[in-house]
Image: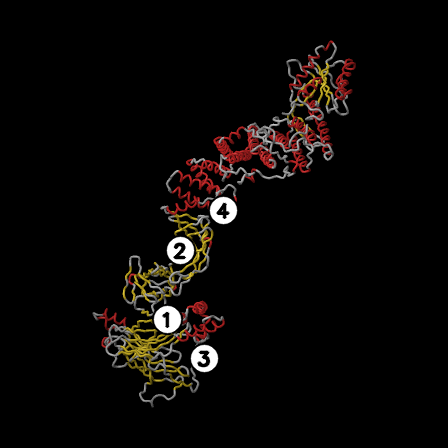
Amino acid sequence: MPRPVTITYTLHPSPTPSTSNSTQVLQSAISGIKSHLPLRNLHWKSSTRTSIRTIQEVDIELVELGEINSVRDNLGGIGGNGSSVLDTPLVNLCLVVCEDAEVYKNQTRSFIRDWLSLLAARRTPHAPLIVLVNPPNPAGHAAGGKSVWGKDKGVLGKLKTDFNVGKRDRCVQLNLPQVGSYDPAAWPEVMNKLKESLVSAFDSAIIEREEEVKRGEAQRLNVGWNFCTWFLLKESLANSFESVNLPEDSLLIYEELEASFFQVLKEQNLSWFGISKLGATHPGDDSLPILDTTVKPYRELMRSSMISIFDFRIYLFARQGQLLGKLGRITEVAKRGQWFVASLTRRLREAEESLAQHFIESWTYTACMDIVDKCDQWSRIDRPNGDYSGLVAYESARSELLDIARIQVERIGVSSGHLPPIYPFNPASSPYPSTIQEDVLFESSSNGLSDDEELQHTPQSASEQRPILSNEQLIDAQQDEGNCRALYAGLTRKTIKAYEACGKVNSVTRLKADLAALALYTQSWSEAYDLSRRLAKDCAEFLTWDPISKFALEGALQAHRELNMGKDEDWENLGLAYLRACALVDKDKEQGLEGVQIDFEELKRTVEGLRESDTEQDVEEHKAFAIRIMSGQADHAEDGDQTSIEIGVNNVLPVPIEVDHISVDLTDMQGETISFSNEGEILQPGDNTIKAICSTSTQGLYSLQIATVSLGSVNFIYNKAEEEYKLRVKRDPRGVEARLRMPYDIKLDEDTKVVVEIKAGVVEMKDVKMSLRSLVGEVTYLVQVAQMSEQEVNVDESALVNIGDLDPGEDVDIAIPYTGIPQGEYAKAQIVLQYETSSGPREWIDTQVIFMGLPLTVNVQDFFRPECLLSHFTIASDGREYLRIASVELSPPQEGSHAVEACKKQWENSATITPHQPLSCLFKVRKHGKADGNGAVLRLRIRYRSLEEEVRIAIENAFQKLPSSSRDSVRRIAGEWARDRGQWLRPYLLGTSLAETLSDVLWSQHVEGSDELLKAIENDPVEMWRTLEIPVDVPQHRLLTTVRISPASSRDSDAPKEVYEGRAINMKLTLSTSHTWSGSDPDSTKERILVFDISNNEDWLILGKKKGYYTPDPTKPEEQIIILIPLKSGQLFLPNVNIQLLQNPNSNSNPNLGIESDRQTQLLCETYFENAAQSITVLPAKKEVNAIVPIPVATNEIWEGERI
């Protein structure tokens, strides 16, 4: 504890009889001064410091001057410099009572002078203060006063005149109040003057002592310089600051001393040590508290230069800790304690052979626990400012100190055999913790860690006996197994609470692992099971501490087995978590941990237990396995109906695992899924390459979605969608093939159908089933009425068409009707084939797009003649396709009443139509015999194929004749060439053969097998044609009128030889009616009336009956005479004549009017202008034509005429 500041006082009562009670007055003055102690709020402004120091409170001890020597002896003062500048009085009071000037002059002044001489003889910094004590004044008036010049009068004035030095005022007056009363104005002047004197003397003493310290430090390199002596000298400054309640300044001094100590260590100037050894060999060194400076005479040892480095560093740290504790900086005490224990422990390790066994552990344990105890006491002290915020940080440092102490008990337990030398316990031979706390709790520092051999202990001889421990608690733990485990468990739980209080969950987890390990080692299976499960749960929540998680899960599984508990769902969850922990823990790092035993028996038992489990469960994203696809394209199996890929499976576990099933699922753009799987495989630790088979035949670009590894009933599922891995799957050309197409023969008057063409591969297909599913909503396939070879097939409840067995290479076509029309005439459908082979079930899936429209359009135009019907058919492309037409035929029904004659008798060569070049065909239809009243239906049959289809089929047929070695090399280039119509269309249309067109591409790229392909194309023309059959109705209810305009004269001589413009011509209009195409009896048309109308035009002026009515008579033509006047010269065609049907007005009274009217509306008129192509040559007029046209004018004047 710091000493109070000593202030001496000397009393000089007045010897006059009038002041016989002056002694009592002086005692009253001393009592009054003591009542105002300690001094508070002192402000120290030193010339060596930049800021003002405020001393909150100073303890003062008033001692009479004559007693000062005995007091110093009782306080253990040291000679010379002393332990503090406060060892000698800083202020000396002289209290005098003198009211008479003569007494002052004769006695008091001489006494004060002698007193000052006595003080000067002591040669120590001091501040004399003369106090003139005035007895209580009954009148209540203060003695003395001020002159008109502001100076003190009376004795006080004389005192100041005689004893003030310069501006320093050494004199002060004290007017004592009346006995029993309190005057607050009586004491402030005296107490303030006392504070000023104390601060002044303290400043002088400090400056003087600092100069001494500087002079001593300057002699550090001189022979005979002693660090201990200099240390005590400078420490006196720290003690002085501490005594006046300036702990910050005192702490700064000790930090400077510590830095000087480390500097001396580096300079290896250790001659000042009386014992040139490290120390730590005295009895009780391992159990003494390090924050108590009274347990050893540290200062006496330093004064005699007999202190060891061990004791010196403990004393230096203890003084710093005490000052920090006084300042309330307990967190800093704890953190500095960690560093101090770590650094001194490392130094002790260098001389461990000369120390007691487990001395370092015992001293470390004692030091940490002592720091914790002292800091706990300081933490409970009330803060002056009420600030307790630092206690949270202290809990963190406190928990680490407890952890260090706990580790020392653990080492002693392992060394004594009370704890196993395995993970997580620290081996006794390890100098530092082997777990993660080494970096945190024992951080290295270069300060004071010199490797100089002078600091090493002298090796003990064989005859010398090593010291023994003195810590009774650790001795009991070392000797008794129960005490050791109880001490370790209790300290661990205490440390856990400390870590939980500061929120260090990771450290809590580490310590819980130690408790679980202790329970496992002591075979407390129930406790071990509970602790291990809770520990594993904490590790899972914090997503950290994988090695501890593995240890906890392994312990829980072991305790579960020892307790003979059933393998329920909880056990399975523990097992899966254990597998995950084993996969995450680095095996190499784990093997490198000292004390960790690598045993995979528990892992093997867990794997086997999971395999035998009957509970089906899916585990997502487990760390035990990692799956990837090795290549970007699937391979074909030998049988032609399977594809395979290589899958890389990384078994992260350190033991071989026999899995039951491995599969990967992939999807295409339409969402269809295929699976590659492998049944039964032993996965060795590390990378494994296995072959996975897919029994579904498909093609396209697929994306990896899910990978699965099955271990018994446990499925390890891995989501691979985010990897965006693409796999290209191609069908084996030797395998099954199915194609959706339109029928080769299409009849427009029958149900619309599609054809599924199935071709077996190289294997025999049994129990083949097919399904067709529309992927567009407008189209529906009627699978229930599907036909195969024009016979209906069986369809099961799942809409699967039963096809039966197919031999290798066998083809079969299935026709399926459909309803609806897709938008854009393109429909998308999915074909699925399911069948059995000798090696197992197979599936074939494909999504195809089919064009359901027709690539051509057909238009017909009929020309009626009395004896026949001329039908003109125009066949055009749909605007996209280039078509080749083999033939166009128009056939009458068998045993019908019509005969058809084609303009083109035989089709020796095909015709090509383009989007801009249609094809025209002309047919003549005749009637023979009696026609059916309902009319006849002719069949227009067109044989055609598109050029793209022709090229594709030609190349495919050529590929079939090539060997496989040549086929693979040329297939890709030929396929790309065929799909690019721009490369071959133009030369192909101009007559270049397909082989010649393809040869330029193949030869330019030097493709192997090109010659064989070209030869096969040239020698194998395409024979496939499509047929479109269109029903054509023979026109019915057509009343044909033959029109002829001829000269009216029946003799040629009467006909005009020359026709001139403007001259009239007599012409005869002849209208002949034919009922050939009316489909009715000629007698039924007697009441029908026809109207003819000759159309006006710019060529002719028609005179006469140009519009008239007549009743048609097939036996007698209608004749009319008309006059035609040509209006211009040139070759003029005859005017057109229109024939329309008109209802007979006399038929209103007919009761069957409704029926007749219906018939008349059904009958249409057709006109055949027999001589429509005939023209008349009109010559220009021979002379001008004049006409007189009267024109009215405004003046009523009429002109005679005007030439036009």
Question: Residue drawn at (41%, 43%), measured in percent from left and top?
Answer: 573
Q: Which residue is mark 4?
A: 587
Task: Answer above or below: position of 119 versus 720.
Answer: above
Q: Report, in whole angstroms, how far the alpha carbon at label 3 lies from the one at label 1.
A: 69 Å
For marks 3 and 2, the one nearer the N-term is 2
Residue 747 in percent (x, y) is at: 31, 69
Q: Report, in whole angstroms, how far the alpha carbon at label 4 lies from the one at label 1.
A: 76 Å
Residue 116 in percent (x, y) is at: 76, 20
For marks 3 and 4, the one nearer the N-term is 4
Residue 677 tag number: 2
For marks 4 and 1, the one nearer the N-term is 4
Residue 316 in percent (x, y) is at: 63, 31
Q: Residue furthest front?
A: 463
- Amino acid type at circle 2 is Ser
- Amino acid type at circle 3 is Trp
Q: Residue furthest top?
A: 17
Q: Which residues are magenta?
A: 673-679
Q: Which residue is mark 1?
A: 857
Task: Name the secondary structure under disc 4.
Answer: helix
Task: Answer above or below: position of 728 versus 998.
Answer: above
Instruction: Reply yes or no: does residue 792 show up in magenta.
Output: no
Task: Name the secondary structure under disc 3.
Answer: loop
Q: Report, in whole angstroms, how far the alpha carbon at label 2 lies from the one at label 1.
A: 51 Å
Q: Nearer the viewer, residue 1165 or 1153?
A: 1165
Q: Quadrant of the N terminus?
A: top right
Name the chief secondary structure element in magenta: strand
Q: Which residue is mark 3?
A: 1199
Question: How packed is label 3: few (under 14 Cα within 10 Å), some, or many (20 or more)?
Answer: few
Of the residues tagged 3 and 1, which is closer to the observer? 1
- Amino acid type at circle 4 is Lys
Question: How packed is label 2: few (under 14 Cα within 10 Å), some, or many (20 or more)?
Answer: many
Residue 1014 in percent (x, y) is at: 43, 73
